[in-house]
Amino acid sequence: MKVVLITGASRGFGRSLALAFAQKRHLLADKTVQLHLWARDASGLAETARLVQAATTDDAATAVHVTTTVVDMGARDDYVDKIDIFLAGVHAQGPSQVVLVHNAGTLGEIGLAQDLSSVASLQDHMELNVSSVMWLNKRFLDVFGTREASSPAPATPHVLVNVSSLNAIEPFATCNTYCVIKAARDMHHRVIAVEQGAFVKTLNYAPGPMDTNMQLALRESDRTDATLKGMFQQLKTTGTYVDTLASATLCVEHVFGPNFVSGSHVDYYDIAA
C-alpha cells in the first residue's frame, strides 16, 4: 500500500495534483493507493474527490481510496491534532511509501516591503505557509524518518514535495511576503534532503505561472508592480498560462522518474517537452 497526502486540494493546482496522482497511479506500482485530500473548503474537497473517483472507477489493477479532511493549516489548534491522527493511522497500516505534497498556501500581502499592514497579518501568513509545513514534516520524520543520513534506506524512499515557485529563487517587486515564504520552504526541504539522505527524498517543484486565484489577485490589485502585472495580463490575453493538470502531471512523473534528485528545485519549464 502507498499513501499520498495533498494539502490545499479543494481547487486549482491542488485539485490537479489529486487528479494527476489518480491518472498516473500505475507509477506508484502498488495495488492499493490511499489518497488523502486536505483543505479548508469541504465542498471543494468533495468535488475533487468526485473527480478522482470518476477517473479511477474502472481500474481493476489499482484501487484508489480517497479520504477528505477539512483542516485549516493556518490554525495550529486545528492542524496539530489532525496531523498526529493522520500519521498514527498511516503508520499502523505499514505503507511501503508515503508521499506528502505541501500545496496549501497564500499569496500574502501584495505591495512594497514597507506596505506590510501589521505583524498579526504577517504571522498569519507565516503560520499557514511555513510553520504548519515545518511541523507536518517534523511529525512525519518522527514516524518515518531517520536521525542518521547514513542509515540503511528503505527499498522505496518516502517523498516530501513542496509546491514552490520562481519567487523562491528570484525577487519580484511587490511580492515580498510570497518570495520570503517560498524561499523559506525551499530551504527547509533542502535541509531535510541533506539530513535524511536516501531515507526521505524532497522536491521543490515550481509549477509555472497558472491561471489560478493567486494570479487573478495579482492581475487585479492596484498594488502589483506594473511590469509584473503587464506580464501576467499578457499571459491571460494570449492564453499562454501553464495548464494546471499538465504541470501536475509532470510533477508526478518526475517524482517517480529516473531524474529526481533529492533537494532539487525543479521548474515546470525545466522538464516540459
Image (spheres, helix red, strand yellow):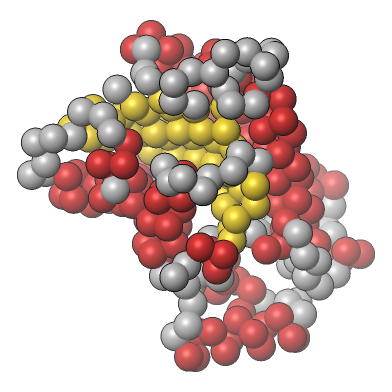
Q: Quadrant of residue 138?
A: top right
In this picture, residue 223 sits left or right of residue 135: right
Where is residue 166 shown, x and y percent of the image? Answer: 67, 63
Instruction: Please tell me whether residue 115 is drawn above or below residue 190 in the rendered image.
Output: below
Residue ranking furthest to the right:
114
Q: Quadrant of residue 174?
A: bottom right
Quarter in which the N terminus is drawn = top left
Instruction: Please tell me whether residue 255 is drawn above or below residue 76 in the rendered image.
Output: below
Question: Which residue occupies the foreground of this view, 77 or 86?
Answer: 86
Residue pictured at 50% horizontal, 69% vertical: 210
Where is residue 37 shown, x and y percent of the image? Answer: 38, 38
Question: Which residue occupies the foreground of this view, 173 or 108?
Answer: 173
Q: Quadrant of residue 57?
A: top left
Question: Which residue occupies the foreground of this view, 67 or 144?
Answer: 144
Residue pictured at 37% horizontal, 12% vertical: 94
Residue pictured at 57% horizontal, 22% vertical: 199
Instruction: Please tell me whether residue 139 is drawn above or below residue 125 in the rendered image.
Output: above
Where is residue 171 shown, x and y percent of the image? Answer: 80, 66
In this picture, residue 4 sits left or right of residue 102: left
Residue pictured at 75% horizontal, 51% vertical: 183
Q: Is residue 152 visible?
A: yes
Q: Is residue 12 visible?
A: no
Quarter in which the C terminus is drawn = bottom left
In this picture, residue 63 sits left or right of residue 206: left
In this picture, residue 171 sits left or right of residue 114: left
Count of labels shown?
0
Where is residue 83 shown, x and y percent of the image? Answer: 52, 23
Residue ranking furthest to the top:
92
